[in-house]
Amino acid sequence: MTEYVPKNPGSVTRYILVESPTLTPAELAIRAYEISEGAMIKETCFGLLINGAEDVVDRLIEKLRAVDPDHIFTKDRGFVPGDPRRCRANLGGARPGFHGIEFETTVLPYVSHGLFELRARDAGGVPAPESTAESKKLDIYTLKKLIEAQEP
Amino acid sequence: MTSPVRIAQLSCGPEYSGVQQEINEAAKSVNGEIFFPDIALKDIIKNFEEFGLEVRSPDLKLAIARAKALVEGRVDADAIFIATCFRCAEAAIVRNELRRYIRNNSRLPVVSYSFTERTTAGTLLTRMEALTTIARRRALLAREAQQGLTLGVDSGSSTTKAVVMKDNRIIGTGWQPTTEVLGSARDVVAHALAEAGVKRDEIEAVGTTGYGRFLVGRDISADLIQEELTVNSKGAVYLADRQHGPATVIDIGGMDNKAISVQDGIPGSFTMGGICAGASGRFLEMTAKRLGVDITELGPLAMKGSGNRVPMNSYCIVFGTQSLVNALAAGSTREDVAAAACHSVAEQVFEQQLQEVDIKEPVIMVGGTSLIEGLVHAMGELLQVKVVVPRHSQYIGAVGSALLASGFVKEG
Amino acid sequence: MAKIFIYPATSLILSDLVARYGHTPLSSATAIRERIQTAGIESVPLQITPEEPKKGLKWAAVEVPSGVRGRMALYGPMIEACDAAIVISEADLAFGCMGCARTNELIKYLVREKKVPRLDLNYPKSEEEGVRFVAAIKRFLAEQGGGK
């Protein structure tokens, strides 16, 4: 059994994911370096990883988000950037969580659209999403209409 | 140093059970390296759907997709390790079907294991060692005849065995219960050498296997120190003269059991159980003791009785033995009790382990327990096949070691 | 500022929206960070040691697989701490921390049993659904008070 000594206690790491038609992760990185206040910034294929004291990271993210608020998303990460335990180079493949993000990325354009629309619209006036019930059965009256609509 | 054997891990749960580190360490100690096959999300979805097993756990979907990538050669690996949580039904189905799928569609050696949070690197070591041996040493395992003058020692948990072989024949043997590991090994070696009429320094190569293989191997300067899964399957097909084609090897040991599916003398998939003493030779030893007979008499005694007439409420070594004691008190015959004990062990091995390997004939039983006729009979009845017990089957590990060690005999 | 349990707990989308509207998302990452930043026995990769499945016994009995109990050691305390929850029902492709269907069933049930305000949703599949999705979350979070 080996003793474990954590390397960056007290710091936080957050992902910044850019899913934008007009802004690349590299452009956002340049902006981030300018205002980093000592936070560690790592560029990745999907955006940035930022590590540092929580208040510094929070301020930085707020400023970066302002660049393109509807297309920049953030999430916490347990590991610091480049941690060998989660690095693709050491595992042979992506950590499983990567595929989860990969999936959610396909949904992001709809969320971005929602965020954009709701700048001008009041959320209160938007109808609720459809029920999450798994299968919606055809009601009997509609079915009857469909049957009657068929040519004999 | 040779480059590590690349072992692809297909799994659900080890990171969350706190055992991933143990898996990594076990692999590392036999110069293996665990990795996770890399595939894109669209391939995960596509492969999972093509495979057609509709499980719900995302990590199992990922395991299925990764298995497909390995079998189809989109990701390179030398061996595959499948690991899922013990007691998870969904994962057990996936584990079995993936093992079968890989076995039928590729030449990659595979071992599957269901872990608990108590699983340690030590528990996994023998399995990992077998996996890397099969991947790395196919040439060694291809040997079909013993050459020169070699010695094999099997330092098992219950007994220690040794054989001396010369020109493809066994010329000396030694056997005794394991007490002090090194002492027992030295004694059986001395006995085997004396019986063979040769001196230690005449021996051209030495192989060791079994629990004490490392300790004994260092003590007697072995050329080959090898786990018992590959050694025993090699020894079994050699002794039974079934070196070509498929075979199934069953070895019910003193502490753990092995069920190995073999093709041309090389293990393809195997299981190794060791959680319950009720499924081991130890249970039969306890029964023999209670019946007041020597373990060698238990088999013939069982053949005269019928296990059906004795109610067994448990398979446990404690409570199962108690059932047998109760049966004796209630007037059951010793023959019936002996038969019931044999049936109980056979049934447990059948239920817990033989379900995880594909039974292909011939079924070869080896190890000390294969001399217990009643046990072999019970296993044959459960499997509905005629079980083969080759001559010298109790020396299986020692014979396999002596055979494989001849790969180290210097030519000329 | 309310503590919002998100399901899947690995969700980028939910984590982002909850934080964006001024609340605290309770996510896998924060639970893993806690372990990564605590000294103890080394256990790669997540610093989940065999002790975690034992802690998980609080939520699932010993006959429940160790992977479920280990994961519950992450999620159990979060469910206990949460003020409200947002649940995406059909999160079939959340791997890793959310990779076990049995754990996920238990998590959803425990959230339900806790009887805190809960919003159930599906992932949006069109732009219009995207608007409804974001609006529903925004309204729900505003109802929890203290946000921005």
Image: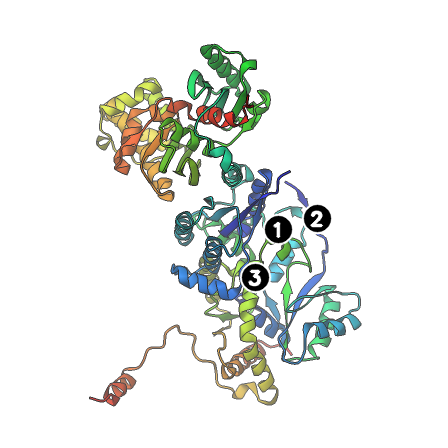
Q: Earlier in the sequence, mark 3 or mark 2?
A: 2
Tell me which amino acid carries mark 3: Gly
Query: Quick one: quadrant of the C terminus of chain B?
Result: top right
- Locate residue B274, reporting x and y percent: 44, 35
What residue is rendered at 43% in x and 61% in y? B48
Q: Amino acid at mark 1?
A: Gln
For the residue pair A43 and C107, the one nearer the viewer reads as A43
Per the image, label 1 sits on a secondary structure element best described as loop
**Foreground disc of the pair 3, 2:** 3
Q: Does residue B158 appear anywhere in the picture? A: no
Q: Amino acid at mark 2?
A: Val
Q: Which residue is mark 1?
A: C47
The residue lying at 69 percent from left, 60 percent from top is A81
Image location (x, y in percent) of residue B332 = 23, 25
**Residue under circle 2?**
A5
**Image quadrant containing the N terminus of chain B:** top right
Chain letter behind tag 3:
A
Report, in whole angstroms, how far the alpha carbon at label 3 lies from the one at label 2. 24 Å
- The answer to which of B261 and C123 lies nearer the viewer is B261
Location of residue A96 by image quarter? bottom right
Instruction: Indicate the position of residue A122 as horizontal and vertical percent values.
Output: 57, 88
Which residue carries the number 3 mark? Answer: A97
Residue sitting nearer the eye, C131 or B113: B113
Badge 1: residue crowd in 10 Å (few <14, some 14–19, many ≥20) = many
Disc 2 is placed on an element classified as loop
